[in-house]
Image: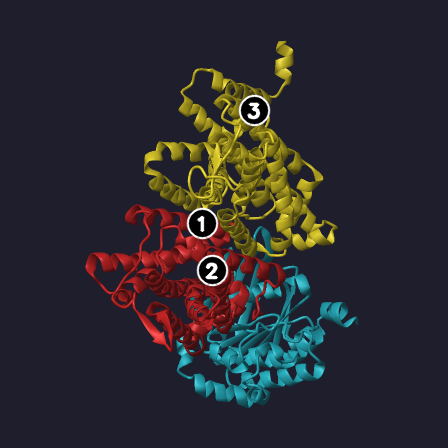
């Protein structure tokens, strides 16, 4: 047994232990608030990992995340009104988000850099207007506005939702790992380095950005859907809202764009700040804006970047079996 | 209801002038520095709030208040460019975008802390008045917006073609290296250009505030409108910006007329997306 | 600094990022001369000009211009002091008119006062520019664009004019015409340092020349001396 353990790299052990701890949290008699914090952490983490994939690795600074999570959420909500079980609506919603990303690409993928970003900013706004106006299920509304409750999920316990979120978060980490280590990941690095050279080497620069975009939309939709499962209702104003984009951006950038651990650290910080300053909502966001700027200027690789300047951290990471991959 | 189409037509044109004014700053910054300032909308709203504050606390008429709001926003713009964005450009491609985002965050929440999320409006004796054109009535504020927009755009045109500084900015936007070799201090020029854009934002914000109610989060809407104007009208063309504004204004008022006012912003956004998809360089862009 | 030498580049090392482009390069430019910088594409000629103009800064060594140390000066300062570069690829402002291009040439405070006067001088040197003064710069032919940027450079009242790869893409007739005009410019007291790939032409048109290879100065001398150099003969004239 001892020889077996010594063969496994410390990194895997540490990760496994962390996952086990996370998994038992709901049944460990923790205050409900804590479970909520970690639940949100997991949802933000999944979304941050996906944004890291497209913005950090594929160079697509997309501000369209609210569109994907909103579409998934509304698919979930509306399908429960039509008698479809919530889990089917959840998965269907994620898939629809992916299809929507594919359709969207026709409009925005021809744009580069800044044009692209604002194009993606417009999309959630359009959806917000659409869902304010569109009443597919003509029933008395609950929660005011154009919102819908999500039926059939009130039976779910916090723990169950939590475990699903944990699964999605793990999935997001696995997905990004697979993509980066695949040919797709190689191509992405090439395109980031020198788009024209990559294109003349036969890399289909359009496709190579499209796949991560769709993948990210699906998982963002999945994570978002889970949020609405927890919240049990959905309405356009807070769904198609740039606040989501801000959370995702902050989680990724504060931790460190283009680093594997960045989204994890960033999400922790964001959730921490969010709840520490919950009563001072606006101050918290203002502070996060300042942090964003400071981080971007001082350490573009975020907190992970700062940590990488200390040899202690690097030696720890090497011991864990995760040698320093120079983040660019 | 479908009686007279003249009203939305005239309103659309007048509104378009204001939209062009909002877009002016964005267009300039993008044309010169290739940066889409994500915080532009929020900076315009900041102008609105500043005017509002001057009016509420000091009773200062917003147009007179421009004496204060213009230098304040100019200075802020200069600061943002010189100390934040300039460094951001050197760091990475996404850094300026993210920093602009951070600035937007700060402004939105700072304003919300200072003024609460409630709707605000700048009301003066003349901002609520209306005037008659034949048998039709129009709000004075719309007309005022249009006239001011024209004045500002003409002033900018004169600045860019007649003054050395203006021509230097234009030159730097067309060929940065050559501009540097002409003795143009490009490091400072960009800060100046940003400051100029802020002047137009201050003016736009003040008059916007007199025409429509606003909240701390109105910035996103202004940004999209400004962006839409720039997209439709094309870059590098004052005339294009003006016409882009008119087109968007007309889209808004005409769709409100035909489909009801709830749908108007939807059509405006859709128009932006459609132009983006079909002809991103705009109708008059180079 | 001797009265004769107007620009002294002393053993500079220049890097593009981590790549070293110039190795201990020393150049002396004498007042009023026509100096050629010759070398193949990767020799470092443009890098040297850009360093003189302040777009790049040497990692070691120094550059002195008439008793000013300009090694770490900003580009606009160097133009103000009196060194103007006509960059590679012409460097026009494509969407501006010929007149606007010329006028922006007198941007520095020093030159602004004499804008109208200098404009007349430039028109005299290049009458074609006056004919086309309202035309948008990008619609001019290659030769006309080259004339435009030289004229624009002159508007800044330089003491030294640096010209980078002037003859690229131009017909020999035009190149000769421009060199003739440059002689006139030189006669008005302006020192000219130009970069060329065409060795024969460069030695022909210049008083002295420096030959660069892989970022180092390998030869220098008057055109007469260089024509005698075995190396030059073998390498470039195939003798």
N-terminal of the pair, mark 1 or mark 2, is: 1
Chain letter corresponding to the colour yellow? A
Q: Identify the chain of the residue marked 3, using the numbered disc in the image.
A: A
Chain B drawn colour: red
| Horizontal and vertical percent position of residue C163 | 58, 74
Check whether the beta carbons of the residues at disc 3 and disc 1 lie within 8 A of each other. Answer: no
Dot 2 crowding, Cα within 10 Å, few <14, some 14–19, many 20+: many
What label does residue A319 carry, if any? 3
Q: What residue is pinned by disc 1?
A: B101
Check whether the beta carbons of the residues at disc 1 and disc 2 lie within 8 A of each other. Answer: no
Q: Identify the chain of the residue marked 2, using the numbered disc in the image.
A: B
Task: Decide: is B282 above or below A138.
Answer: below
| Horizontal and vertical percent position of residue A88 | 62, 31
Q: Is residue B126 left or right of residue B133?
A: left
Q: Secondary structure at mark 3?
A: helix
Evaluate whether residue C6 shows in this view.
Answer: no
Q: Secondary structure at mark 1?
A: helix
Q: What residue is pinned by disc 2?
A: B225
């Amino acid at each position: 047994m001892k020889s077996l353990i010594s063969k496994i790299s410390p990194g895997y052990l540490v990760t496994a232990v962390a996952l086990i701890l996370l998994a038992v949290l709901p049944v460990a008699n923790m205050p409900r608030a804590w479970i909520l914090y970690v639940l949100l952490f997991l949802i933000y983490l999944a979304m941050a990992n996906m944004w890291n994939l497209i913005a950090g690795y594929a160079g697509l600074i997309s501000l369209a995340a609210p569109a994907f999570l909103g579409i998934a959420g509304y698919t979930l909500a509306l399908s429960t009104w039509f008698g479809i079980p919530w889990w089917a609506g959840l998965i269907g919603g994620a898939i629809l988000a992916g299809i929507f990303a594919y359709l969207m690409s026709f409009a925005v993928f021809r744009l580069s850099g800044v044009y692209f970003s604002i194009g993606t900013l417009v999309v959630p706004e359009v959806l917000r207007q659409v869902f304010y106006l569109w009443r597919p299920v003509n029933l008395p509304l609950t929660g005011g506005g154009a919102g819908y409750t999500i039926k059939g999920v009130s039976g779910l316990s916090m723990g169950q939702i939590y475990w699903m979120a944990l699964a999605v978060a793990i999935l997001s980490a696995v997905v990004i790992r697979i993509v980066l280590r695949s040919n797709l990941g190689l191509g992405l690095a090439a395109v980031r380095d020198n788009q024209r050279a990559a294109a003349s080497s036969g890399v289909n620069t359009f496709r190579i950005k499209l796949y991560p975009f769709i993948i990210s939309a699906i998982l963002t939709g999945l994570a978002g859907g889970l949020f609405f499962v927890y919240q049990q209702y959905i309405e356009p104003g807070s769904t198609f809202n740039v606040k989501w984009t801000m959370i995702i951006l902050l989680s990724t950038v504060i931790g460190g764009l283009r680093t594997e651990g960045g989204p994890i650290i960033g999400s922790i910080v964001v959730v921490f700040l969010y709840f520490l300053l919950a009563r001072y909502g606006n101050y918290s966001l203002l502070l996060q804006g300042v942090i964003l700027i400071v981080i971007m200027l001082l350490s573009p690789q975020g907190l992970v970047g700062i940590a990488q300047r200390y040899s202690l951290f690097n030696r720890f990471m090497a011991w864990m079996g995760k040698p320093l991959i120079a983040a660019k | 209801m479908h009686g007279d189409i003249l009203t939305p037509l005239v309103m659309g044109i007048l509104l378009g002038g204001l939209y062009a004014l909002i877009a002016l700053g964005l267009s300039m910054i993008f044309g010169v520095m290739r940066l889409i300032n994500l915080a532009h909308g929020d900076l315009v709203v900041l102008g609105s709030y500043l005017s509002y504050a001057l009016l509420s606390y000091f009773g200062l008429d917003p147009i007179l208040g421009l004496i204060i709001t213009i230098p304040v926003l100019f200075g802020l713009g200069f600061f943002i460019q010189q100390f934040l964005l300039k460094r951001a450009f050197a760091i990475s491609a996404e850094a300026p975008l993210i920093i602009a985002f951070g600035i937007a965050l700060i402004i939105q929440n700072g304003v919300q802390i200072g003024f609460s999320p409630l709707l605000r409006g700048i009301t003066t004796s003349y901002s609520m008045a209306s005037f008659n054109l034949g048998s039709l009535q129009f709000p004075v504020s719309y007309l005022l917006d249009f006239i001011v927009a024209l004045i500002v755009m003409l002033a900018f045109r004169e600045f860019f073609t007649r003054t050395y500084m203006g021509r230097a900015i234009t030159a730097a936007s067309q060929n940065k290296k050559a501009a540097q070799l002409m003795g143009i201090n490009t490091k400072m020029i960009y800060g100046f250009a940003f400051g100029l854009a802020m002047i137009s934002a201050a003016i736009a914000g003040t008059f916007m505030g007199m025409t429509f109610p606003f909240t701390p989060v109105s910035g996103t809407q202004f940004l999209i409108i400004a962006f839409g104007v720039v997209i439709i009208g094309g870059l590098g063309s004052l005339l294009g910006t003006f016409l882009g504004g008119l087109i968007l204004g007309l889209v808004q008022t005409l769709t409100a007329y035909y489909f009801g006012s709830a749908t108007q912003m939807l059509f405006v956004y859709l128009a932006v997306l459609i132009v983006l998809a079909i002809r991103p360089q705009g109708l008059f862009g180079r | 600094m001797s009265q004769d030498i107007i620009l002294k580049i002393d053993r500079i090392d220049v890097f593009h990022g981590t790549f070293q482009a110039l190795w201990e390069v020393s150049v002396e430019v004498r007042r009023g001369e026509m100096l050629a910088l010759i070398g193949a594409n990767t020799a470092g000629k443009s890098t040297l000009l850009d360093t003189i103009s302040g777009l790049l800064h040497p990692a070691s060594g120094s550059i002195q211009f008439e008793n000013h140390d300009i090694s770490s000066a900003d580009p606009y300062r160097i133009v103000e002091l009196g060194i103007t570069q006509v960059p590679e690829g012409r460097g026009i402002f494509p969407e501006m008119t010929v007149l606007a291009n010329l006028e922006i040439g007198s941007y520095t405070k020093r030159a602004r006062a004499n804008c109208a006067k200098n404009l007349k001088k430039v028109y005299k040197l290049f009458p074609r520019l006056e004919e086309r003064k309202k035309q948008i710069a990008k619609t001019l032919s290659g030769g006309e664009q080259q004339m435009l940027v030289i004229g624009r450079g002159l508007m800044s009242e330089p003491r030294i004019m640096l010209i980078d790869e002037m003859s690229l893409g131009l017909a020999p007739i035009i190149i000769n015409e421009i060199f003739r005009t440059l002689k006139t410019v030189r006669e008005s007291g302006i020192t000219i340092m130009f970069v060329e790939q065409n060795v024969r032409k460069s030695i022909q048109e210049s008083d002295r020349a420096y030959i660069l290879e892989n970022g180092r100065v390998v030869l220098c001398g008057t055109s007469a001396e260089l024509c005698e150099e075995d190396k030059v003969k073998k390498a470039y004239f195939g003798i």
